[in-house]
Image: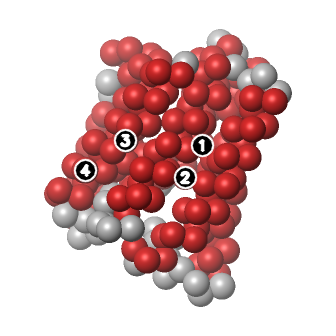
C-alpha cells in the first residue's frame, strides 16, 4: 500500500488538489501520476513478468538501471507536457522534483543499496509539510513505519534507510525552490 509508486500517485493527487483548491487540480495530478507513477510501475511489472527483474521491489541493484532509466524518460515526457499545457506551478514543480529525486536515487543506487522506499517516503513527508504545514506531521509516522518495515524485512540496513530518507530531502528542496 505504501510502495513508492503508490506514494508518488497519492502525493501528486494531494498536491494537485492543493494547487487549485479543488477537483481541477486533481485532474492535473492524475495527468502527472500517469507519467510519474503508472508508467514507471508498468515498466517494472512488465520486467517482472518477462523475467528480467526478480521482483517489483527490484532488490537486485544492477537490475534497477533500465527500469529507472525508462522511468526517467516517462517523467521527463510528463514535465514537457505539463509545461506545454500550463499546469499549475505546484504540480509542475513536484514532477520536476520527482525527476531530480529519481536521478539522485539512480546515481546513488549504482554504487550503494539505498532505500528507494524511504527516499520516496521521506520526500513525500517533507513536501506535504511544505504544502500543508504542521497539519501534515502525522504523515511522518508512515515514513517511520516504512523504514521500520524495510529493517524488519531485512531489505535494508539502518544507514540505507536513513540515507534514503535524507535523499528525499533533495526532492523537497527542488519542490520548495520551484513552486
- Asked if 85 appears above or below 115 in the picture, the reply is above
Q: Along the line of sight, which residue is nearer the eye, 70 or 37? A: 70
| Mark positioned earlier in the residue sequence (3 or 4) | 4
> Which residue is located at x 25 percent, y 65 percent?
156
Alpha-carbon span between mark 2 and mark 4? 19 Å
Residues at marks 3 and 1, CA–CA distance in whole angstroms: 16 Å
Residues marked 3 and 4 touching at CB (< 8 Å): no
Disc 1 versus disc 4: nearer the observer: 4
Helix, strand or loop at mark 3: helix
Which residue corresponds to mark 4? Answer: 163
Asked whether the viewer can see residue 151, the reply is no
> Going by the image, does 84 lie left or right of 34?
right
Q: Is residue 175 left or right of residue 90?
A: left
* Residue 37 makes an appearance in the image: yes
Which image quadrant is residue 111 in? bottom left
Q: Residue at x 66, y 67 (%)?
A: 43
| Residue assigned mark 3 | 168
Residue at horizontal 65 percent and vertical 12 percent from the top? 21
Is disc 1 placed on a helix, strand or loop? helix
Tag 2 near tag 4, CB within 8 Å: no
Tag 2 secondary structure: helix
Q: Residue at 46% of width from left, 45% of height from top? A: 101
> Residue 5 has which mark?
2
User: Which mark is nearer the camera, 3 or 1?
Assistant: 3
Amino acid at each position: 500500500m505504501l510502495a513508492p509508486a503508490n506514494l508518488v500517485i497519492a502525493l501528486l493527487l494531494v498536491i494537485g488538489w492543493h494547487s487549485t483548491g479543488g477537483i481541477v487540480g486533481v485532474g492535473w495530478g492524475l495527468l502527472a501520476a500517469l507519467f510519474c507513477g503508472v508508467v514507471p510501475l508498468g515498466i517494472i511489472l512488465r520486467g517482472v513478468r518477462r523475467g528480467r527483474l526478480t521482483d517489483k521491489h527490484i532488490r537486485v541493484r544492477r537490475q534497477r538501471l533500465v527500469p529507472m532509466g525508462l522511468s526517467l524518460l516517462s517523467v521527463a515526457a510528463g514535465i514537457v507536457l505539463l509545461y506545454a499545457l500550463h499546469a499549475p506551478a505546484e504540480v509542475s514543480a513536484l514532477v520536476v522534483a520527482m525527476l531530480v529525486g529519481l536521478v539522485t536515487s539512480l546515481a546513488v543506487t549504482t554504487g550503494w543499496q539505498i532505500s528507494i522506499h524511504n527516499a520516496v517516503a521521506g520526500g513525500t513527508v517533507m513536501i506535504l509539510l511544505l504544502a500543508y504545514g504542521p497539519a501534515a506531521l502525522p504523515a511522518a509516522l508512515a515514513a517511520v513505519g516504512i523504514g521500520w518495515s524495510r529493517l524488519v524485512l531485512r531489505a535494508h540496513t539502518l544507514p540505507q534507510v536513513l540515507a534514503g530518507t535524507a535523499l528525499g530531502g533533495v526532492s523537497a528542496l527542488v519542490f520548495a525552490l520551484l513552486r
